[in-house]
Amino acid sequence: MTDPRYDILAIGNAIVDVISETNDEFIALEQLTKGGMQLIDADRATSLYDAMGPAREISGGSAANTLAGLSMLGHQCAFIGQVADDQLGQVFAHDIRATGIDFDVPPLGKQPPTARCLILVTPDAQRTMNTFLGASQFLAAHLVDKDLIASAAILYLEGYLWDPEEPRAAMRSAIEHAKAAGRKVAFTLSDAFVIDRHRDDFLQLMNDGLIDILFANEVEIRSLQQNDDFELSVAATAAKVPLLICTRGEHGAIAVQDGTRFEVAAEPVARLVDTTGAGDLFASGVLAGIAEGRPMDQCLTMGAVCAAEIISHYGARPEADIKALVEQKLG
C-alpha cells in the first residue's frame, strides 16, 4: 500500500451558512424546531431569509467544517462537494481553498444555486438550522475519482449528504474505492432526521464492516438504536464498529475503541455564543489525533478543545489558533 497523500478526504454538502441572531418568539412564529435541522425548498429559503434579521455569510457544511479544523491543525485534506456557478459557489470555493484544502470539483452551472443553511441563533446559543441543499444534492458518482479516494488515509462521509439519491450513490462508490485501497472509512450520522430516513442503510453499512469510525451525538445514537437508554445504545453500536465517538454536549464525550471505553469532560468556555459546528470541530480534533497516532484519550481531548473554541463565537470555522490551543492543553 502506498503512503497516502492526504490524511483525510471528505465528501459532504458544499454549503454557505447565513447566520442571524433571533429569539424564541421568532422560532415559534416560523414554526421551527428549536435546536434542530430541517431541509427546506427554494421558496421557503427565500421567505425565511426575507423574515430573518441582519445576517453574516460564512462558508459551512458539516464535513467541510471538519476539514477546515483539520487543516488548521496541520493536516493535508481534500474535499468533494458540489457548488453552482454563482456568487455563493465562488465564496465557498475561495474559502475552502484559502484554508489549504484541495477542492477541484467543477461548478454545476447556474441552477440549481449553491446550497445555503439559514441558521437562527437564540440568546441561549442554540442554533436552529434550515438547509436548502440546492446544487449540493446533485453530486454525481462520476466525480468520485478512484485514485483520489485511494490517496487518503481516511475517507470521511457526512450523513446529511446520504439523503439525496445522487450523492448517496457517489458515497457508496467512494466506500468501495476506499475499502479496495485498504483505507479507513469514517462516517458521521449528522442528525436524527437523517437516521430516521436511512437507519436500515446505516446499520447495514456497520453490519457489513464498512464503517471503521462512527461519529454521533447522544440524540443520534439513541435514534439509531431506537432506544431511549444511552448506555444500551452505545453498547449496541460499539459492538458493530471498531471505533465509536459520541459527543454529549456539556457532559463531554466518550469513545469506545475495540471494546475499551474512554471519556473526556467538556472544556470550559468563558461565554457560550453559538453551538453551530461543535460536533464538526470535535471531529476535527479527534481525526487529527488519529492521524497523528495519538492515544484515544488525547484524541478526545483535542476534540474537546476544538469544540470549545468554535462555540465561543459565531460560525463554524475556527477563529483562534486551535493548533496552539491543543498544544497548550496537551503540553
Image (cartoon, helix red, strand yellow):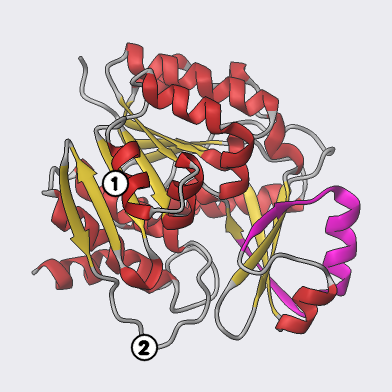
Vertical placement of residue 133 versus 316, above or below: above
Locate the C terminus by quadrant. bottom left
Residue at point 59% right, 57% down? Answer: 59
Number of marks in the rendered image: 2
Do the residues bearing badges 1 and 2 touch, measured as CB atoms within 8 Å?
no
Farthest-out residue, left: 331
SS of the residue under disc 1: helix
For the point 71% across and 30% down, which residue is it? 138
Q: Earlier in the sequence, mark 1 or mark 2?
A: 2
**Residue 58 quadrant:** bottom right
Q: Give the percent coordinates (x, y) of residue 8.
A: 35, 37
Image-quadrant location for residue 321: bottom left
**Is 143 placed left or right of 132 in the picture?**
left
Q: Which mark is residue 270?
A: 2
Where is residue 249 shown, x and y percent of the image?
A: 40, 67
Mark 2 belongs to which amino acid? Ala
The spot of residue 74 in percent (x, y) is 27, 52
Residue at x-position 16% and y-position 71%: 329
On residue 252, the disc is none
Q: Does the segment drawn in magenta span residue 282? A: no
Q: Quadrant of the N terminus?
A: top left
Name the residue nearer the viewer: 121 or 237: 237
Query: Where residue 320 sits in the image (x, y, percent)?
Result: 37, 73
Pointer 1: what residue? 287
Q: Is residue 93 above or below residue 326?
A: above
Say if residue 303 shows up in the picture.
Answer: yes
* The residue stretch that appears in magenta: 36-58
